[in-house]
Amino acid sequence: MSLLFSDCLNEIFEYLENDNISLHSCLLVNRLWCEVSVRILWRNIWNYNNRTYNTLISCLPNESKEILSKNGIIISTSKFPIFNYASFCKILSINRVHHKIEQLLKNQRYSQDKINLVIQEIFKMFAKQISSLKQLDISLTSSWQSNFIFCLGAKDCLENLTKLYCRSSIDQLSQICHNISLLDILVDSYISNGLSDFISVQKNLKYFVITLSCYDLTDNELTNIIPSLMIKLPNTLIKLDLNGRQQHYISLSLVANFSNLQELVLSFGYRECFEDFEKLQYANFPKLQILKIEKACPRYKFLINFLENNGNNLKEIYIGDIRRGCSDNSLNLAIAKFCSNLRKLSTGIKINELETLKIIFNSCQNLESINIWCGGEFLREKDALDTVVKYSQNVRKLILYNQSDLQFKLLSKQQLETFFINWANHKPQKSLSLMVVNYDTSNLDTNDMINNYSELGVIKEFHAIVQSHFVWTEMYNNFL
């Protein structure tokens, strides 16, 4: 009966996986609740605070503590923790744990050599105690990382791994991991001979991300190597994310092979990197729902043909950094014409093309979230807000991003309040989440006003962010 009750609690607590506050409350009920909830809490320690990492250090075995003590590193704990927390880990990022431990010990004035020793002992503990990982990030380069991976593989705790973030130099997992569903590869100065084999043995690969960040490999080398990797990818792939950065070139002709794609992300630094998008313009992706062009843009006529062929199924479109030329009225009109089922949109509209925004709202009446690029040659903030109020049907999330290199002041408090008043009368009435990016809000005291309209249900959330360049931050993506 006790085991049955424990299993029931575990099923219930699984629904709280992303609710740390509730899980922490469960710890205090009784021992059984504590034993069940602590395993879920410690499944992923990526974003925890310094106290958590102090606890992790205190879990080190006596052998490790003796090594640290001989090197003048004092572990400030009077007794071993109640649980062996490291053994609960299912999601491990070497990068983040490394960074968090380093940050913690630097604050305690330890030298880098001593910090590295602590980190080494932490990962030795992980290698010995983790029984089965689900997600692993090993994209950090380090002298001891290969040995750590070997130890994990030797004890079979990588057999059930489903998500892997790694560098292209990885060369020792193809005999162990066959069930990867998400593979995120950072191409560095070396691409191992075993990487192609590793990709080919995956039975359940659904999400593939590749980022070219190295300047040591020539464009000719990359042009030869990358296709050899992509031809190993299964046709069952549902997300493909190609990040070329700078002038690195990734052939797009092979993308047409993945007819089951639901999400396609293309991020290249220059339009020249899209030189073979012409071969993709008439490709058919009947399941495609998300299209992201994050930096430079293909030639508009090719992209418009692509939207004509695939736009009807699209739910989300992100047209990239318009400082790189990713803004054109013909493209926006094509979005309105061919993508009537959109839920989310990010695009730039010139100051003399306000009518196009109205057309988009009239054509895409299911639009729930929109990011409008403002400032300079693009729409004025007041015009954007007025158009959203008058013409949007179902928008409930709005981002105004100022494209100017200068941080312009946000609309006056009076103008902003006028928008909130008008939104309160919007039909159908929906609470609005508003984010403004790259504005100087230092002289704009809106706290009382935001609180008042939040209480009235007009505003759900409001964020003002100052940054010099647009990035697809986690906060932005979560908001959108």
Image (cartoon, grey):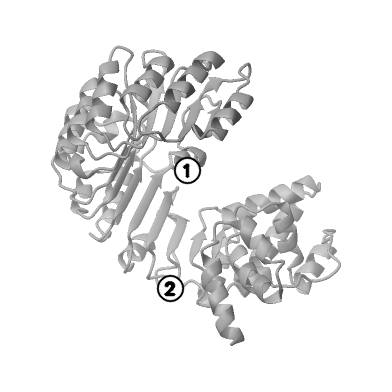
Which label sits on residue 140? none
| Residue nearest the viewer, comparing 64 with 410 | 410
Between marks 1 and 2, how big is the CA–CA gap? 34 Å
| Residue nearest the viewer, comparing 406 with 216 | 406
Residue at 22% from the left image edge and 55% from the top image edge? 260
Horizontal placement of 90 versus 357: left or right?
right
Residue 16 can be seen in this image: yes
Residue at 72% from the left image edge and 52% from the top image edge? 50
Above or below, 75 relative to 280: below
Disc 1 on helix, strand or loop? helix
The amino acid marked with disc number 2 is Ile
Q: Few, some or many C-alpha atoms within 10 Å of disc 1 (few <14, some 14-19, many ≥20)? A: few
Which label sits on residue 478? 1
Where does the N terminus fall, quadrant-wise? bottom right
Residue at 21% from the left image edge and 27% from the top image edge? 300
| Residue nearest the viewer, comparing 184 with 309 | 309
Q: Measured from the top left, where is residue 443 in percent x and y? A: 63, 16
Return the disc, 1 or 2, that comes first in the chain's sequence: 2
Above or below, 242 relative to 260: above
Q: Measured from the top left, where is residue 176 in percent x and y? A: 43, 73
Where does the C terminus fall, quadrant-wise? top left
State if disc 2 and disc 1 touch (CB < 8 Å): no
Horizontal placement of 161 versus 94: left or right?
left
Which label sits on residue 176? 2
Above or below, 351 relative to 326: above
The amino acid marked with disc number 1 is Asn
Q: Measured from the top left, where is residue 387 in percent x and y? A: 34, 20
Disc 2 on helix, strand or loop? loop
Residue 142 can be seen in this image: no
